[in-house]
């Protein structure tokens, strides 16, 4: 499937080394001021080639809006956006034309479809996530209208964990580090791996603030389930935690329960979601990215004819995919909340009456 969402939904298209990639966003309410400068600024946060901690592939990621806007405002019709690729080096992948890269989707795509675009992974490349960020920017413009804010940053690199979460610092950090006291150590870990032709993993932390109570559709479209779905659909993500996540299994019920008083919850171990529905507290996600599988060391693999070979990869790749992945996670979170907001509008008769009055 290439489409995500029910009411606020988007479909992406394109490949890593194709002519272009993009998306169609449907279900966007009419009347939103479509801030093109903001949309471009979101793509700039994710785009490659900004520093030595990212892939050397340089793409401007200039977005063109083709439809769904009139006199600067959304019309309620589908919004189409396209981003043209300008810096492909497809020849770098000629040596893997008939070889499966370990840790990549090459093996599974080939066996599922009987064909694969070996140029940078084609559709399975993280290059596709530029389109998700473009769609997520439109979702953020909707969320801004009701005061919902989404923040993200890197809390862990190569096992070096943040002890403080400063989202303002993350906005200024070249690796989006949340803890400035850990940032240099995290940078050094990335550099060491890069110099050794290797890669490291990382954890992105996403916080959704000012979410209304009641978002989520039990039983089979729960808010936490859809958020986990959205995060696990991002390239290289291997685990997602909501609230205390795995740590909650190590506590007692008396410790893990978020007790309640008239002015709200006394804690937030649940991460802002109870029974699949938002409870008004901050929604907290930890998104775990594996080390980038594209490394420049000799590895064992097989060919499309099942011949065992040793090979060394060429190309340009992120030494820590979590860095730019954090922006994608933030965008996907925005898309989920936008979808849930629209779905929630008709959850009560009073809400329906209020609208039609």
Image (spheres, rainbow, N blue to C red):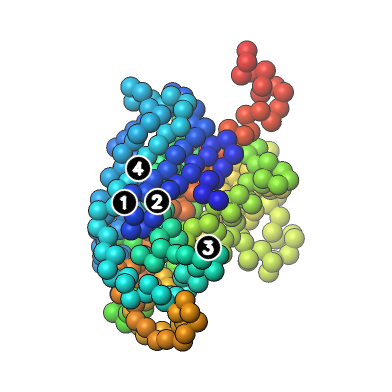
Q: Are marks 1 and 4 in contact (CB under 8 Å)?
A: no
Element at label 2: strand
Q: Mark 3, mark 1: which one is toward the viewer? A: 3
Decide which of tag 3 and tag 2 comes sooner along the chain: 2
Question: How far, Cα to Cα, is label 4 from label 2?
Answer: 9 Å
Q: Are marks 3 and 2 in contact (CB under 8 Å)?
A: no
Q: Do the residues labelled 1 and 2 touch (CB within 8 Å)?
A: yes
| Drawn side of residue 84 relative to residue 77, left or right | left
Question: How far, Cα to Cα, is label 3 from label 4?
Answer: 26 Å
Q: Do the residues labelled 4 and 2 touch (CB within 8 Å)?
A: no
Question: How far, Cα to Cα, is label 3 from label 1?
Answer: 22 Å
**Image spot of residue 301 (x, y percent):** 45, 82
The residue where tag 4 is placed is: 82
Residue 161, located in which quarter of the rendered image? bottom left
Element at label 3: helix
**What is the number of the mark on residue 14?**
2
Decide which of tag 3 and tag 4 comes sooner along the chain: 4
Element at label 4: strand
**What is the number of the mark on residue 19?**
1
Decide which of tag 4 and tag 2 comes sooner along the chain: 2
Question: How far, Cα to Cα, is label 3 from label 2?
Answer: 17 Å
Q: Mark 3, mark 4: which one is toward the viewer? A: 3
Q: Label 3 crowding class (10 Å Cα cut-off): few <14, some 14-19, many 20+?
A: few
Q: In this view of the protein, can residue 239 be seen by the observer?
A: yes
């Amino acid at each position: 499937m290439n489409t995500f969402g029910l009411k606020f939904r988007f479909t992406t298209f394109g490949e890593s080394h194709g002519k272009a990639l993009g998306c169609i966003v449907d279900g966007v309410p009419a009347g939103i001021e479509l801030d093109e400068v903001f949309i471009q600024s979101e793509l700039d946060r994710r785009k490659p080639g900004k520093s030595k901690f990212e892939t050397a592939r340089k793409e401007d990621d200039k977005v063109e809006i083709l439809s769904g806007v009139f006199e600067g405002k959304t019309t309620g019709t589908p919004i189409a956006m396209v981003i043209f690729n300008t810096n492909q080096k497809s020849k770098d992948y000629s040596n893997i034309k008939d070889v499966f890269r370990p840790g990549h989707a090459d093996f599974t795509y080939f066996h599922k479809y009987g064909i694969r675009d070996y140029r940078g992974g084609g559709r399975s490349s993280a290059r596709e996530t530029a389109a998700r960020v473009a769609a997520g920017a439109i979702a953020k413009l909707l969320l801004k209208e009701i005061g919902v804010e989404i923040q993200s940053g890197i809390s862990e690199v190569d096992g070096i964990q943040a002890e403080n979460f400063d989202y303002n610092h993350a906005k200024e950090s070249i690796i989006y580090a949340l803890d400035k006291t850990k940032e240099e150590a995290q940078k050094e870990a990335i550099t060491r791996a890069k110099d050794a032709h290797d890669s490291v993993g990382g954890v992105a932390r996403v916080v959704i603030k000012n979410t209304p109570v009641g978002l989520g559709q039990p039983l089979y479209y729960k808010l936490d389930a859809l958020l986990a779905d959205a995060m696990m659909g991002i390239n290289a993500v291997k685990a997602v935690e909501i609230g205390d996540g795995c740590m909650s299994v190590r506590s007692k019920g008396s410790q893990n329960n978020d007790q309640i008083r008239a002015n709200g919850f006394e804690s937030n171990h649940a991460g802002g979601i109870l029974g699949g529905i938002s409870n008004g507290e901050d929604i907290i996600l930890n998104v775990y990215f594996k080390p980038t599988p594209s490394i420049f060391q000799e590895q064992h693999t097989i060919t499309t004819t099942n011949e065992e070979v040793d090979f060394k990869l060429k190309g340009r790749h992120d030494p820590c995919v979590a860095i730019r992945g954090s922006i994608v996670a933030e965008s996907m979170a925005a898309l989920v909340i936008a979808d849930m907001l629209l779905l929630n509008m008709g959850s009560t008769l009073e809400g329906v009456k209020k609208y039609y009055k």
